[in-house]
Image (spheres, rainbow, N blue to C red):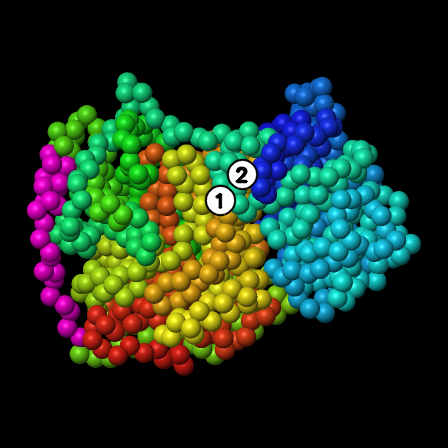
Amino acid sequence: MKSDQSQVANEQSWPILGGASNKMVALRRAPLVQTLLLDNYDSYTYNLFQMLSQVNGLEPVVYTNDAFDGDWDVAFATFLKHVDRVHALHRHVEIRVNIVLSPGPGTPTKVKDFGLCAAAIARSPHVPILGVCLGHQGMAHFYGGKVERAPTVMHGRTSRIQQLADKADPFFFGIPRTFDVVRYHSLLAVSLPVGTLEILATTTEDDLVMAFKHRELPHYGVQFHPESVCSEFGYQMLQNFRDISTEAPCQICPLHHAPSVSLNELATCSAIKFPVVQPELSPPSSATHHVLVEALIAVDVATEDVFEQLYGTSRHAFWLDSSNGARFSFMGDAAGPLATHVAYDRWTNTVTTAHGSSTESILDYIRRELAAIRIVDDTALPFDFRGGFVGYFGYEVLGVGDKSDLAVHPPPDMAVPDASFVFADRVVVHDAVTRQYYVLVVTTAKHLTASKEWMASTAARIRTMMPSKGRPADSFDHPIVFRPSRSRPTYEANIATVLSEIQAGETYEVCLTNQLIANVSIGNPLGFYKTLRRLNPAPFAGYLTTPRFSVCSSSPERFVSVNKHKHMESKPIKGTRKRAADPDEDAAVAAELAACVKDRAENMMITDLVRNDFGHVCTVGSIHVPTLMQVESFATVHQLVTTVRGQLRPTASVVDAIEATFPGGSMTGAPKKRTMELIRRVEQHPRGVYSGALGYLSINGAADLNIVIRTAVVTHNHVTIGSGGAIVALSDTDDEYDEMLLKTQALRSALAAYTNQPVTVDVSTSFYNL
């Protein structure tokens, strides 16, 4: 519930988000509208939340469909009390109410899927109600229509719809007779009672019902998703619903999705008035820690030489290794006076450090530790990392069920923590553009002298460093054979199960994954990683090592970054093609990927999901998509990449941002909650490090983490590579299996090059006998 956090937007002016001018457009003074947004556990609800906040002037109150134990009377009474409190603060403005029923998985015929929404329709006949997708179907079902499987499953796909010629309804004021919308549905409302419900719009191609209204009550339904980034006139529809709720004349809405607007432009022009947040720096008198840095002039020494010579023998070390266009790399270990290694066991909810253990989540631990640090940072640096936590969050870290729910778990010699971090108080930074190195420390007065001595000696070592000879290569005399965690027949059966669930409306898209496991001992994981980074450079690569395991990542995907001004960014990837050797063929492959309906649908679903996740913690009006479904090319593959940006609320921390967005939607599918439950049932084993996030959380509130893909986890006797792909209604089983294997190719090739042995995959067997 958001009742005590509602923010009143400026009711006199609104921004044009996008287009050529970004001018302020004055609107008439009108009543504010307080929406009760009933969330059917969808992954697009908070896109509606953000847009309704902009249109209405007040943030909606959000209840899940099972809130208040399903008691509508208690729910609505609580909502009205909130409205009274808001009105007490704004007595000069009239406040009207309406209800929006969100999209969601499942069917409205099941109480667990529709919950409070059914009672809202039945018990609030004179309150304006808008049903979206599942809400639309539920309204049709309540008034006597039927909900059946649609002739074609449509998830993340665009359709052209038409207003019926003789219907000039205010809900479609200011909207052309035909326009494009994004649809997410497997089910469809049919056989509508024409005496009760009036059809307002249908698809142009096959006349499927896309919108209706009640003939006497202010109840509307739309089957499509007006909140999707590629739906036209979504803001106009929501504003029209606002005006219907206030009985005011409809008018043209100046708001629309803004793919071209930067955060700085938004901060300048937005009527919501969100600030460009400056980092919180403590005055010297109250600071607990100081940040010191020395910048070295350009030094012609390779980062792998610096890492190997400074940290190659460290027990706990990290190397956030940016390449392929990325600029900064960070390296360090747990040897400093303030440093420690942190491990988390999700099943016991235990955080363990060198100083002891505590029963709490890893996010709560990091939140508490970061909140206790107040820094003096007078450094004007081109990067945001000022020391802090470096490591990974495993996929299961936020909890998706009990340990007993899974059929199998890794054997003890393959088990790794659910999260593992180093608190880094000493860091070496490399700028790939200027070739400069920086030596940075986080220190206290007690350790100031030792910190300065370390800075001086480390700087001197880098200045005089010669190329590293490296450790002798491991010797391998047997071919390496990977076995999947689930055999090909099982994986194909999993795909069939997922497709069945999609057809039934239980999910829109599922990121189904597998793991390839080889019995092989890599005595020098750093040597393997150096081979990997040479063959498959990636912008969000990284190497972590501990006495028990190492993580070798060549990830091309950013999960989330937050800079010191609280600007957030995510770069989800959906859509992959193997590169061709011939330039013309390679260009054709990239063009085919850019135009592929299936891959664009996958990417669209995750783009809208990431926007939704940002909507939990970002300032109203700040979320935008500067690049949508662009092909980015890497050493071995082309990928379809989108960029989503937003402004973190002033009251939200970087840990709040991670909590709202983790795991990355490109590794779950949508809607996230129910899809993760389905994944757990079909995959039958934990994903571990794979599908999680690896990177840093800085003491100044910044963060940058990747999605853990294209990654090998090296334990004493095994190498494990996770891989998968999005299953959608258009998926082909053979193609999906081939894509899963393709995404492991760079790692298998690196392992073959490092070991000088053939590397194969036996898809007929299963490591876990699944």
Q: Are marks 2 and 1 in contact (CB under 8 Å)?
A: yes
The foreground one among 640 and 310 is 640
Left or right position of 459 against 559: left
In the image, which residues are magenta? 453-476
Distance from the alpha carbon under mark 2 to that under mark 1: 8 Å
Q: Earlier in the sequence, mark 2 or mark 1?
A: 2
Q: Residue at x 27, y 27 (%)?
A: 378
**Residue 622 bears which disc, if any?**
2
**Residue 155 bears which disc, if any?**
none
**Residue 645 bears which disc, if any?**
1
Q: Residue at x 22, y 47 (%)?
A: 435
The foreground one among 177 and 37 is 177
Magenta stretch holds residue 466: yes
Magenta stretch holds residue 61: no
Quadrant assignment for the C terminus: bottom left
Q: Is residue 599 above or below residue 200?
A: below
Tell me residue 355's x, y (percent): 24, 39
Tell me residue 131's x, y (percent): 73, 48
Q: Is residue 668 above or below residue 753?
A: above
Callout 1 amino acid: Arg
Task: Examine the rendering and report whether any part of residue 298 can be seen.
Answer: yes
Q: Residue at x 11, y 36 (%)?
A: 456
